[in-house]
Image (tube, helix red, strand yellow):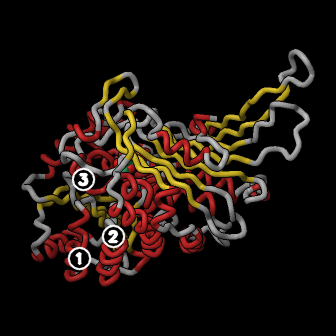
């Protein structure tokens, strides 16, 4: 199957930092279909050779095992092409169309890796010039809007030129292997399904912790904040995968229908419940992994006195028969104690313990990163000393070890799926809009609340109020248990 993959924003961060390394891996593993061309478009004038050198130089930033040798890069680079494009000029789109149509590839994937404010303009021009035929798919990278109205506006423009199944909204968390495993765990095995409900589960905690700060993205981040950057998309997508009903088929719409139902079942926030159930924080200076770290307000391009949150913890519920009353805690932040993304399913304790003092509930930990694995925490007899000496142990499944062959990274999987037209892992417009609808009351409540985010020291697990949020229900975050 021949394909043309076009990156708008071809010299931008996302392209060289994530997309090119992912494509290189796909190519190295022989997963990229033969007969492909990759075209980067951007504003400045460069030849193909200059663009290839530009990408090659950027590979030094990639972890060493994933860097190409000169010889490998030379072969991979044959796929790379470059075109100058001024995105405001219709004739440049016509030129792009000619470039694509001269060859007539089976599939054309147009990946918008530009700043999102350019999406409407690009999508309109693509429609006008006729680059929206049935073999064309357009991939939209987050952030898609900054609130419900702006997301709806982008979707309106996209819909005017492309069918829903031609518009692929990326949430790179859905590309992570652990998310595939979550589907496999829940719907490929019968073991957990009878337990996957309010009768057996006490609470669920979704944590996406980062140890990095905002780096050089201070201006973008300051307009965005953790709620828009991580909760509206990544954390909520993980929540839908945990809470959804079994889909009837393994196909994109069957899955996305079920995810949408979860989003619609989330308890809506009011100004009062935001004050009670949502904690926002902002990091101050501290120590992260042994290195001193400056506070958010000292980061480059962050405006003085900014009230943007770099941390959010919240409590919600999925209001349906399966989950009524079970708290779902979501937590994400920058400059936290560790890079650690995991979902912890805390089961209820035994109804009656014959082992006094050791009624430790079971928990299932779904680890997304840094490792990709599963832990099932149990109590077991130590076998030493008196007959009732029990100890916590856990079954530890490391998927990277279990599946030794080259495992595919998030962007790699999503790019391959975009080329193949598999939509399971892309977010549908109604899901995306529903996520904004749910998040928006939080944004509005914060606008009216001048107390601002709570400070926390870099290298910690966020403000103490986040622990109190969970403690109020008689629970604790995983690292405090
Ligand atoms: C992006 C956010 O969507 O996800 C970043 O914009 C964040 O702020 C990143 O750092 C985290 O992704 P990952 O895959 O490194 O956990």
Quick check: can you spot residue 26?
A: no
The x, y position of residue 279, in whole percent, is 46, 51
Quick check: can you spot residue 17?
A: yes
Residue at mark 3 to residue at mark 1: CA–CA distance: 26 Å
Q: Nearer the viewer, residue 324 or 270?
A: 270
Give the mark nearer the N terminus: 3 vs 2.
2
Q: Which residue is mark 2?
A: 138
Residue at mark 3 to residue at mark 2: CA–CA distance: 24 Å
Q: Which residue is mark 3?
A: 220
Q: Which residue is mark 1?
A: 126
Q: Secondary structure at mark 1?
A: helix
Q: Height in image: 451 above or below 398?
A: below
Q: Is residue 301 found left or right of 184 in the rendered image?
A: left
Q: Height in image: 75 above or below 65?
A: below
Disc 1 and disc 2 in contact, CB within 8 angstroms: yes
Q: Nearer the viewer, residue 105 or 158?
A: 158
Give the mark nearer the N terminus: 3 vs 1.
1
Q: Nearer the viewer, residue 58 or 430?
A: 430
Q: Secondary structure at mark 2?
A: strand
The x, y position of residue 145, in whole percent, is 32, 67
Quadrant of res 95: bottom left
The x, y position of residue 163, in whole percent, is 39, 81
Which residue is drawn at the image coordinates 29% and 36% (left, top)?
295
Q: Is residue 213 found left or right of 378 in the rendered image?
A: left
- Mark 2, other Cα within 10 Å: few <14 / some 14–19 / many ≥20: many
Residue at mark 1 to residue at mark 2: CA–CA distance: 10 Å
Mark 3 vs mark 2, foreground winner is 3
Disc 3 and disc 1 in contact, CB within 8 angstroms: no
Mark 3 vs mark 1, foreground winner is 3
């Amino acid at each position: 199957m021949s394909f043309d993959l076009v990156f708008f924003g071809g010299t931008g961060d996302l392209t060289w930092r994530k997309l090119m390394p992912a494509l290189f891996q796909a190519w190295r593993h022989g997963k990229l279909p033969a007969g492909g061309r990759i075209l980067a478009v951007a504003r400045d004038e460069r030849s193909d050779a200059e663009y290839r050198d530009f990408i090659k130089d950027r590979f030094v930033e990639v972890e060493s095992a994933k860097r190409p040798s000169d010889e490998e890069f030379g072969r991979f680079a044959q796929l790379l092409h470059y075109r100058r494009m001024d995105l405001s000029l219709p004739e440049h789109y016509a030129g792009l169309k000619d470039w694509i149509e001269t060859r007539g590839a089976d599939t054309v994937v147009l990946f918008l890796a530009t700043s999102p404010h350019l999406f409407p303009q690009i999508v309109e021009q693509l429609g006008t010039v006729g680059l929206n035929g049935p073999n064309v798919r357009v991939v939209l990278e987050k952030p898609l809007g900054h609130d419900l109205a702006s997301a709806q506006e982008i979707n309106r423009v996209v819909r005017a030129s492309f069918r829903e199944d031609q518009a692929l909204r990326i949430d790179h968390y859905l590309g992570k292997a652990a998310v595939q495993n979550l589907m496999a765990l829940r719907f490929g095995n019968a073991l957990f399904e009878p337990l996957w409900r309010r009768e057996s589960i006490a609470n669920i905690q979704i944590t996406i912790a980062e140890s990095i700060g905002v780096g050089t993205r201070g201006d973008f981040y300051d307009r965005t904040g953790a709620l828009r950057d991580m909760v509206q998309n990544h954390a909520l997508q993980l929540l839908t995968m945990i809470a959804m009903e079994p889909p009837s088929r393994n196909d994109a719409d069957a899955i996305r229908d079920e995810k949408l139902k979860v989003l619609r079942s989330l308890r809506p926030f009011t100004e009062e419940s935001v004050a009670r159930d949502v904690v926002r924080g902002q990091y101050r200076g501290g120590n992260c992994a042994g290195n001193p770290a400056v506070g958010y307000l000292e980061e480059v391009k962050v405006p003085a006195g900014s009230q943007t949150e770099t941390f959010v913890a919240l409590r919600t519920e999925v209001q349906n028969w399966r989950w009524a009353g079970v708290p779902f805690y979501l937590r994400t932040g920058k400059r936290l104690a560790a890079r650690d993304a995991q979902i912890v399913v805390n089961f209820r304790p035994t109804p009656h313990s014959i082992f006094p003092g050791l009624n430790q509930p079971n928990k299932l930990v779904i680890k997304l990163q840094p490792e990709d694995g599963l832990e099932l925490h149990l109590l077991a007899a130590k076998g030493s000393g008196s007959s009732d000496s029990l100890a916590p142990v856990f079954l530890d499944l490391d998927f990277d070890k279990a599946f030794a062959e080259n495992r595919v990274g998030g962007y790699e999987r999503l790019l391959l799926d975009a080329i193949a037209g598999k939509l399971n892992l892309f977010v549908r417009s109604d899901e995306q809009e529903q996520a904004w609808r749910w998040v928006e009351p939080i944004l509005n409540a914060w606008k009216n609340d001048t107390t601002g985010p709570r400070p926390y020291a870099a290298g910690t697990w966020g403000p103490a109020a986040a622990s109190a949020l969970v403690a109020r229900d008689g629970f604790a975050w995983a690292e405090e248990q």
